Amino acid sequence: MLCCAQNATLGMGLNLRAVALLGLLDLDDTACTLPSGAPETIERLGHWHVEHHHDVSCWKCLCGRSEPLLVPSSFRNRVRLPHDLVQACEVCRNELASCSSRASRLHAWLERNRPLIDRTEHLEYPEDRGFTYSEDDGQSTRTRRFIYEAFFKTKLRSSDFVSSRCSNPFCINPYHLCTKPNPNQKASPEIEKFVAHLQQLGISAKITQRVIAEKFGTKLSLSTVQGLRAATKQLISTAA
């Protein structure tokens, strides 16, 4: 794991962060101070916002969760970012390295890009299939619900339903999401077939109710689920 301290050093004042994050093996930044005034140029490299001043460059991770790195101008052309998909600070890199599931990787992406999400733009998740499965707890959650809870750091009630205010059916921008009560709804033919299938597998009515809510976004009352199961049982009995 990379040390989070800005002034972590090795030997003669060498900066461990500069070694690991920028590939600068012999950088001694002990004499560098945070520059003031407007930079001469600005660029984005990986997940870094880089402000170039006359004597020093200031590297700031776009996540906003770590201290900036100061690089003297003489080292500017010697920077070598890691050859991976996480050209960012140690907070971002350590967070992603600890991920063990698709859900945790999505959560890490949200944290890394939190300051960059534009409230006015649509945000789509190409891999989204409507649900996000976490190998950590073996649970599937509707992606919009997962995003809402992770981004706003809250735990919704089972009666809450997450929908979007915008017109894009694929948008997962947290700022476009809202919660509303999820009233009991009638079962569609697809849900009726699914209830019958779960019943044949020996799944209880209570668990069936929860699975229906997660899979279809439809909250059925327990009595409705039990009624569907009874109808299925009656149908099977009649057919026999």
Image: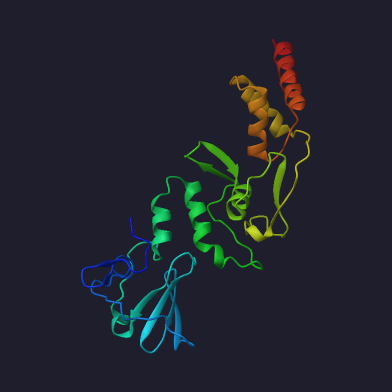
Q: How many marks?
A: 0
Looking at the image, which is closer to me, 156 or 237?
A: 156
Counting from the top left corner in percent of width and height, residue 152 is at: 62, 54
Counting from the top left corner in percent of width and height, residue 17 is at: 33, 67
Name which residue lies at 60% across and 19% down: 202
Q: Quadrant of the C terminus?
A: top right
Counting from the top left corner in percent of width and height, residue 151 is at: 59, 55
Looking at the image, which is closer to me, 94 or 186?
A: 94
Relative to residue 91, is residue 13 depicted above or below? below
Q: Quadrant of the N terminus?
A: bottom left
Q: Is 48 displayed left or right of 79 in the figure?
A: right
Q: Is 77 displayed left or right of 192 in the figure?
A: left
Picture quadrant of residue 90:
bottom left
Q: Is 42 displayed left or right of 147 in the figure?
A: left
Name which residue lies at 24% across and 71% down: 25
Looking at the image, which is closer to me, 161 or 72?
A: 72
Find the residue positioned furthest to the left.
Answer: 11
Relative to residue 96, is residue 62 depicted above or below? below
Looking at the image, which is closer to me, 53 or 186?
A: 53
Q: How is the image coloured?
A: rainbow
Counting from the top left corner in percent of width and height, residue 140 is at: 56, 39
Picture quadrant of residue 122:
bottom right
